[in-house]
Amino acid sequence: MQGISILIPVYNYPVEDLVKNLSSQLSSSGKPGEIIILDDGSEFLFQTSNQQFSKLPFVVYSQHEINQGRLATRNHLASLAAYDFLLFIDAD
């Protein structure tokens, strides 16, 4: 499907500003897309903070219970994507 999947792997890092900004840009673009945040086994505080953004338009939050590592996390993100174009953005 034509559109963009913005994929954000996260580990012990807050993503509030990034996700709010991307959600706003995607919303105003009028183009199809999604933002997928995949937490790779962060501490509870970061998981709790970051999962609240799934309430924003276009945002999906998922998490690994234990750290899977960079490659496994990126592959999982790619498998969750609904659109043809994939944009990986580091949380920091």
Image (tube, grey):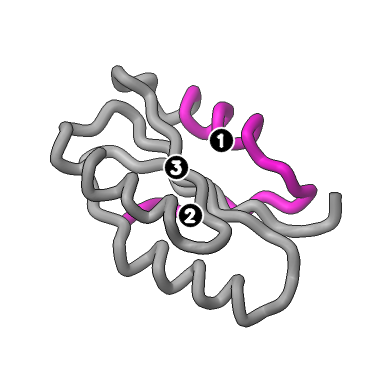
| Secondary structure type for disc 1 | helix
**Residue drawn at x 62%, y 55% as measured from the top left:** 34
Label 3's element? strand
The local crowd at label 1, few if under 14, some if 14 to 19, many if 20 or more residues have their Cα within 10 Å, is many
Disc 2 residue type (three-letter): Ile
Residue at 72%, 76% (x, y): give it: 30
Between the C-alphas of marks 2 and 1, the distance is 11 Å
Q: Residue at x 56, y 35 (%)?
A: 77
On the image, the x and y values in percent for residue 21 come to 43, 73
Q: Position of residue 49 (x, y in %)?
A: 22, 49
Q: Which residues are magenta?
A: 72-92
The quarter of the displayed image where residue 6 is located: bottom right
Per the image, the residue denoted by label 2 is 89
Give x and y (percent) for residue 9. 42, 42
Residue 1: give x, y in percent of width and height: 85, 49
Q: Nearer the viewer, mark 1 or mark 3?
A: 3
Mark 1–mark 3 Cα distance, whole angstroms, equals 11 Å
**First-in-chain label (2 vs 1):** 1
11 left or right, relative to 75: left
Q: Which residue is mark 3?
A: 61
Nearer-N-terminus badge (1/3): 3
Number of the label disc, if any, that sits on residue 77: 1
Instruction: Please tell me in which quadrant of the rendered image residue 79 appears.
Output: top right
